[in-house]
Image: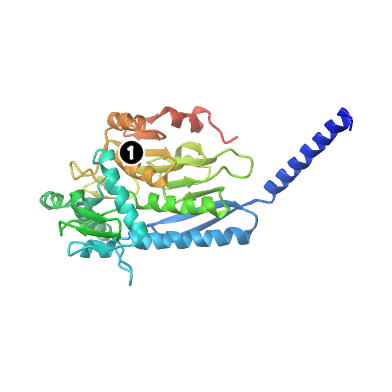
Amino acid sequence: MSKLNRAVSVLLLMALLLSFSLAGTAEMHKYSYMFFGTFDTAITLIGFAASQQEFDEVALEVETRFTQLHKQFNQYYPYEGLNNLYYLNRHAGEGPVKVPDELFGLIAWAKEEQQRTHGRVNIALGAVLALWHEAREDASANPDQAKLPDMSKLEEARQHTDIMDVVLDEENKTVFFRDPKLRLDVGAVAKGYAAELVAQYLLQSGMDSFIINAGGNVRTGHAPLDGRSAWGIGIQDPDATLVLPGGDDVMDVLYLADESFVTSGDYQRYFTVEGQRYHHLISPDTLMPANFMRSVTIITQDSGYADLLSTAVFLMPYEEGRAYVDSLEGVEAFWILNDRSVHMTKGAEKVAHSMGATAR
């Protein structure tokens, strides 16, 4: 075969392979599915699949898994035959309670991570947080009679928040409270931890180009199969009541793939007393809502870790939080401070629309 013929053959082969590649890409379509009833939010799944049927099968499994995890991590409601967090909080002070693997894993992981968050995220703070939850529920039912939790009761509850009183048996998957008045609250980490478990399923499912949006907790899979290099995710303006497509209610857009994006802010769950707003992110130091900023968004791969860090950093003054994030490998952050000024780590600047980033 002549050099010319060989060159033509190579070009034809390359063209054929390219046509196969493009055909494979062209066969993938974008689908979306939204469901309610888990983790107190709407959860949206967007993914690329070969057919509606293929997507629907995966989406149904995603909803099933979120539902299972929601039941396990639920601290407010019991489910027959399930030793979930509600059951655990009521019986672990009496003796070791065997719990499902996922709940045990969440508790063990959060206990281990507490020291790394400078003590800011303590899942054993449940006795304190329960008083704030009750005040928020009462305010929702009777806004004119809204009041803050009694500080003396908060201080008494603080005496029952030592994470070392949570005794774990890895072999038997049991949890025991040495302090019978201790209560766990996993609200700072549960949704992100669940999203990461579901994301790991998706990455192995064959539908690995996806984005999960669980109300401020976003986990992206591989890049979208429509020519973009990343998914665009808006950071909500803390003063906007609702984020609408194409609206002016986002502060910036970040472009991410194979990353998580979790925001903690003062504008989601709150109640008002005498004209002042009190949100749900409570400092373990003051037992009051932190007021250092309006929101912080954490970008890192693991969604559970991002959820944990977003709470921890929100409860730190900006300077402390910035130094803390800068000390962590593979973690970036985006702050909106009380004066609405925006601050970003260098890595966040590289993926921010306002700094010139795009998905192309």
Q: Position of residue 106 (x, y in %)?
A: 33, 53
**Quarter of the image where one finds residue 36:** bottom left
Residue at x 62%, y 62% (from the top left corner): 53
Left or right, 199 with reference to 140: right
Left or right, 198 with reference to 272: right
Q: Position of residue 7 (x, y in %)?
A: 83, 31
Q: How many marks?
A: 1
Colour logic: rainbow
Left or right, 250 with reference to 147: right
Residue nearest the viewer, comparing 103 with 172: 172
Residue at x 35%, y 33% (from the top left corner): 325
Residue nearest the viewer, comparing 26 with 98: 98
Q: Position of residue 236 (x, y in %)?
A: 42, 41
In this orientation, does residue 243 appear? no
Q: Secondary structure at mark 1?
A: strand
Left or right, 184 with reference to 347: left
Residue at x 89%, y 30% (from the top left corner): 2
Q: Position of residue 193 (x, y in %)?
A: 38, 51
The amino acid type found where label 1 is placed reads: Arg
Mark 1, residues whose alpha carbon is within 10 Å: few (<14), some, or many (≥20)?
many
Q: Is residue 324 above or below residue 71?
A: above
Q: Is residue 3 above or below residue 251?
A: above
In this orientation, does residue 261 appear? yes
- Report which residue position mark 1 lands on: 294
Residue at the outermost bottom position: 80
The C terminus appears in which quarter of the rendering?
Answer: top right
The N terminus appears in which quarter of the rendering?
Answer: top right
